[in-house]
Image (spheres, rainbow, N blue to C red):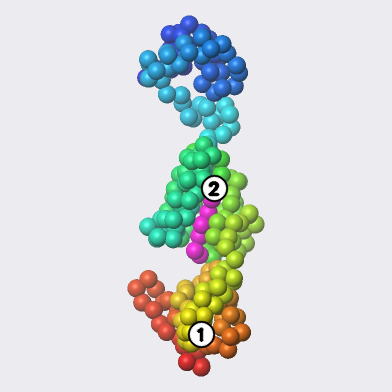
Amino acid sequence: MNSIKDVARLAGVSVTTVSHVLNKTRSVSADTGARVMDAVRTLGYVPSAVARSLKMNATHTIGMLVPNNSNPYFAELVRAVEDACFAAGYALLLCNTDDNAERQRVYLDVLAQKRVDGVIVASTTDDERMSRHLAESNMPMVLIDRDIAGLDRPCVQTDHVKGGSIAAQHLLRLGHRRIACIGGPSNCIRASRACRAGARRCAMRAGRAICWCTVISRSTAAISPCSRC
């Protein structure tokens, strides 16, 4: 495998000059730059991302933790994040945690070892162990879609109360009198509770009843109707 020294030797310049040309850290003459790039193409030289990251203290990579990217919601979320990263010159490293504390811990260690520039976290659980692992990480971190109890990090999320209200309002305008809200278990994440609260407030203002459909697992559900249904 050819090294930067081989490129410098073929181009007839110093290793420092090759580094400046490749990293655009100092202006060089057009002729020198052309000779360096010709040598790079001739040798098929690929700069070491590891060496560059150590020197510049940046890898231009972002890690992202999601519960399961086969879920259509998270798949769409990941795609939007990836597009934004690509446009800014960053690569996205995706990790599926399955909302498993040990799996998340391992991925956090891997991302730290790879010296990613930051981590984006989407979670669907309030598992205390997962929150603790995230809190102990020194990597720059942003939460997306929902905040996590016990974790003081910047968060970009939807107004879930307003979203629930808008959904209920739409159904009421269509003339529906009994509305079911499908959410998570009774101990579900706060985002689901907020969404249901918004739907309930909207229905109460309109004098309507809401029938709650509580999801017990991925494959079963139980209907818990209100007293007026």
**On screen, 83 above or below 179?**
above
**Please, is residue 228 above or below residue 145 in the view?**
below
Q: Using the image as rendered, state which of residue 134 and residue 159 is in the foreground.
A: 159
Judged from this view, the residue extending furthest toward the left is 219
Indicate left or right for 218 with 58 as reference.
Answer: left
Q: Quadrant of the N terminus?
A: top left
Give SS at disc 2.
strand
Q: Nearer the viewer, residue 37 or 58?
A: 37
Residue 199 screen position, x and y as percent: 55, 78
Give the side of residue 43 with respect to residue 170, left or right: left
Q: Position of residue 185 (x, y in %)?
A: 47, 75
Badge number at residue 66: none
Q: Position of residue 22 (x, y in %)?
A: 51, 21
Residue at horizontal 58%, vertical 85%?
Answer: 206
For the question of whether residue 199 can be seen, the reply is yes
Q: State which tag comes first along the sequence, 1 or 2.
A: 2
Residue at (45, 16) in percent of width and height: 37
Kindly identify the residue that appears in the image at 58 percent across and 29 percent down: 56
Please name the amino acid that badge 2 sits on.
Val
- Seen in the picture, residue 66 relative to 44 is either above or below; the reply is below
Residue 187 shows in this picture: no
**Amino acid type shown at disc 1:** Ile
Residue 156 percent location from the top left of the image: 59, 57
Instruction: Determine which residue is flagged by label 2.
Output: 119
Q: CA distance from mark 1 to mark 2?
A: 39 Å
Between marks 1 and 2 in the image, the one whose residue lies nearer the viewer: 1
Q: Is residue 79 magenta?
A: no
Kindly indicate whether the residue at mark 2 contacts the one at mark 1 (C-beta within 8 angstroms): no
Magenta region, residue range: 119-125
Q: Which mark is residue 210?
A: 1
Other-residue count near label 1 (Cα within 10 Å), few / some / many at <14 / 14–19 / ≥20: many
